[in-house]
Each structure stands twice: as C-alpha cells, then as structure tokens.
Image (tube, helix red, strand yellow):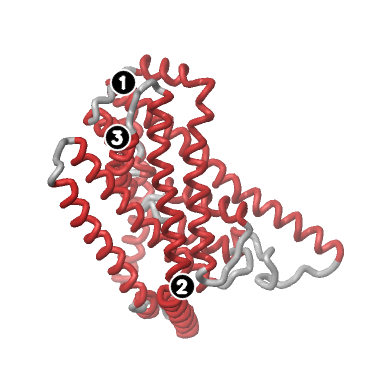
C-alpha cells in the first residue's frame, strides 16, 4: 500500500513536471529569439519586414507548393494500402498533424492525430496507421537526402572538389542503409513487440488481446505494402522529395525578395543544414529560437548579413504560424460541420452507426 501511494505521488509529480519543463523550454526559446532580434538589430529587421510588405504574400507560395507535394506523397502512400481520401481534406488533415507536431513537446504528436482523423472518416485503424507510418518513413528518408545534398553542396562551395563526390557516394550509401533498416524493422513486426510489452501493463485480458490483434493486422498490412506496392511507395517518396526541394526554393525566393543574390546551391545548403537544427523541437517546442539562431549562423557562414538572415527566419516562422493556424482551425471547423450534418440527419431519420459511413463520429471522440 505504501508503495502504491508513492507511485501515485511520483506520477502526480511527473504530471506537474512535464508541462513545467515544456513551458520553461518554450520560455527559453522565446528569450533566445528576443536576444537574437536585439543583437542583430530590431530596427533593421523591422525595416526589412516593412519593405517586404507588398510582396510578402509571395513568401507563402513555395511552402504552399511544399505542403501540396507532401499531401500528394501521403495520398500515394494511402493508395498503397487501398485507401482514398478527397485531396483537399487530406491536405487539411496533414496541416493539422504538422501543426500538432510543431507544438507538441516531442514533435511527433501529429501522426496519431492523422490516424484518428482518418478513422473518423470511416477507415480502419490498422491500414490508416500503416499508411501514416509508411509516409513518415518516406519523409524521414527524403529529409536525410536533403541533408546529404546540403553537405555535398557546401563541400563544393568550399572548393573541396575531391571530397564532394566521395562524400556524396558515402552519404548516399549511408542514407540507403538507414532507409533499409527502417523498412526491415517495420517488416519485422515491431508493433506486435510493442503491443506485447503494453499488454503486460494492462490488467484487462480482453483489452490486451484486442491491442495485439490490431498490432498484428498493422504489421501484416505494412509488410505486405513494402513487398507488393514498392512502386507506389517510391512515388510517395518522390513527392516528398519535391516537397523538401520546394522548401529550399522558399529560402531562395525570400532572400531574393530581401535583395540578396543567392544561388540555388546556397539555398540548398541553408535548407539542408537547417534540418538537424530543427531536431531541437524534441527539447524546445517548434525549435523556437534555436531554429532562428542556427539559421542565422548558416546564413553568416555563406556571407549573408545577420540582419537579413534573421529576417529570413522570422518570415519563415510567421509562415509556419499561418499554416499551423489553418491546420488547428480545421479541427473545430471539421467537428462543427459533422455535428451540423448529424443534426440534419436526425431530423430526417436515424443517424447511421459510427464507422459505417465516411462521416463518422467527431474527432474528439475518435
């Protein structure tokens, strides 16, 4: 009994400490960003932002393309599991998931949300989850390729004409091995391993058995898709790669608008080497402050003044906020639409059971 009481106390402490750490990390990131603005000249950054005014909407164009390419990649991944979703809805679901990834403490909360939204559209959980995992795998591998291209482009810019091709071959081999390991792990039934571990913690035998059945179904669908739908999954990866290249184009467009004659190679270097910096979102929500600080350092390395570099990353942060807001607003709008549709049906007859149509229950109950 004493041990149970201590355990409850420990759990309560952890529940308090987790949001506290999250809040402190967000505060640290905000302070870092404020310090960067102060050091690099708030007045200069403000003037450059004002100067962008009339053409600022152009800053949304490259990322709009990037998000559409990613949605096309996800649609291809869904088709590998014989799932179809209207494209606009799929794009909005993706924006909602990425918005949650931006604000979640671990930076991965958006993937479960995507599965819940697909289930609310009447899809079975196992194929929906498998499609999300396959798409995320393609995103991760193509992101690694972007980093490789950034590193090789930097070596070429530094005049390392011998090291650049050697690095390209070696890093491509490592990336291919990384992707192969990811796929092999997923084909090896990792969900069943996790389910068995979770089953030991659950007192309810029926619940544990249900989880294991779903994990088995998930693993089987994922392994089958990797074996039989490779061309479709490669198409998904190609769309995701185009999405990353569109993100690099965003750097080029914004710096051109800011009056910096940057080359496509330098834009690729900035975007490619910025990817590891964004991994700090595991510690700081949205990589707030660290993304801007690391981005300014990358720009300085390429001879771009810090004021212009900071303006670039602030505009990108603002663009991120705009798209995240669209994704988050989609969630209540979606629930409201379904609630009104449910009321309309109840006025003409009994509503169909949840999961038997594409309407399904509200997301909050998914």
Q: In this view, does 362 lie above or below 193?
A: above
The residue tagged with tag 3: helix, strand or loop?
Answer: helix
Please provide percent x and percent y for residue 336: 69, 51
Please provide percent x and percent y for residue 320: 46, 39
Please, which residue is most extreme toward the right here? 348
The residue tagged with tag 1: helix, strand or loop?
Answer: helix
Please provide percent x and percent y for residue 324: 50, 43
Which residue position is annotated with label 1? 38
Which residue position is annotated with label 3? 266
Q: In which quarter of the image is residue 120?
A: bottom right
Q: Nearer the viewer, residue 312 or 40?
A: 312
**Residue 28 seen from this side:** no
Say which label, 3 or 1, has the lower sequence index.
1
Label 3 to label 1: alpha-carbon separation: 26 Å
Side (left or right) of 130 relative to 93: left
| Disc 2: CA contacts within 10 A as few (<14), some (14-19) or many (>=20) | some
Identify the residue shown where x is 46% and y is 70%.
130
Q: Which of 279 and 134 is in front in this view?
A: 134
Which residue position is annotated with label 2? 229
Q: In which quarter of the image is residue 181?
A: bottom left
| Disc 3: CA contacts within 10 A as few (<14), some (14-19) or many (>=20) | many
Q: In which quarter of the image is residue 202?
A: bottom left
Q: Is residue 216 above or below residue 241?
A: below
**Residue 11 seen from this side:** yes
Please provide percent x and percent y for residue 125: 53, 71
Q: Is residue 308 above or below residue 98?
A: above
């Amino acid at each position: 009994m004493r041990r149970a009481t201590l355990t409850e106390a420990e759990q309560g402490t952890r529940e308090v400490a987790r949001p506290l750490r999250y809040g402190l990390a967000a505060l640290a990131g905000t302070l870092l960003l404020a310090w960067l603005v102060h050091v690099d000249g708030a007045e200069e950054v403000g003037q450059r932002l004002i100067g962008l005014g009339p053409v600022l909407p152009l800053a949304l164009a490259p990322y709009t393309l990037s998000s559409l390419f990613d949605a096309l990649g996800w649609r291809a991944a869904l088709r590998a599991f014989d799932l179809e979703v209207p494209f606009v809805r799929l794009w909005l679901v993706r924006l909602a998931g990425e918005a949650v990834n931006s604000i979640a403490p671990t930076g991965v909360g958006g993937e479960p949300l995507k599965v819940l939204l697909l289930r609310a559209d009447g899809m079975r959980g196992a194929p929906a989850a498998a499609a999300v995992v396959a798409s995320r795998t393609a995103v991760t591998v193509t992101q690694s390729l972007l980093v490789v291209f950034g590193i090789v482009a930097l070596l070429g810019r530094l005049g390392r004409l011998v090291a650049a091709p050697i690095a390209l071959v070696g890093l491509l081999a490592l990336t291919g091995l990384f992707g192969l390991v990811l796929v092999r792990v997923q084909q090896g039934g990792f969900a069943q391993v996790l389910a068995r571990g979770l089953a030991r913690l659950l007192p309810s035998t029926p619940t544990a058995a249900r989880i294991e059945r779903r994990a088995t179904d998930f693993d089987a669908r994922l392994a089958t898709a990797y074996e039989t739908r490779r061309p479709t999954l490669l198409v998904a990866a190609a769309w995701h790669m185009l999405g990353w290249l569109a993100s690099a184009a965003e750097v080029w467009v914004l710096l051109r608008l800011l009056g910096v004659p940057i080359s496509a190679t330098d834009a690729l270097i900035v975007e490619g080497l910025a990817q590891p910096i964004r991994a700090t979102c595991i510690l700081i929500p949205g990589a707030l402050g660290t993304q801007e600080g690391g981005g300014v350092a990358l720009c300085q390395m390429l001879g771009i003044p810090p004021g212009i570099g900071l303006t670039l990353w602030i505009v990108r942060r603002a663009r991120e906020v705009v798209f995240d807001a669209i994704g988050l607003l989609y969630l209540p709008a979606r629930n409201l639409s379904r609630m009104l549709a449910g009321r309309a049906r109840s006025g003409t007859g009994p509503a169909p059971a949840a999961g038997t149509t594409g309407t399904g229950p509200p997301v909050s109950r998914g």
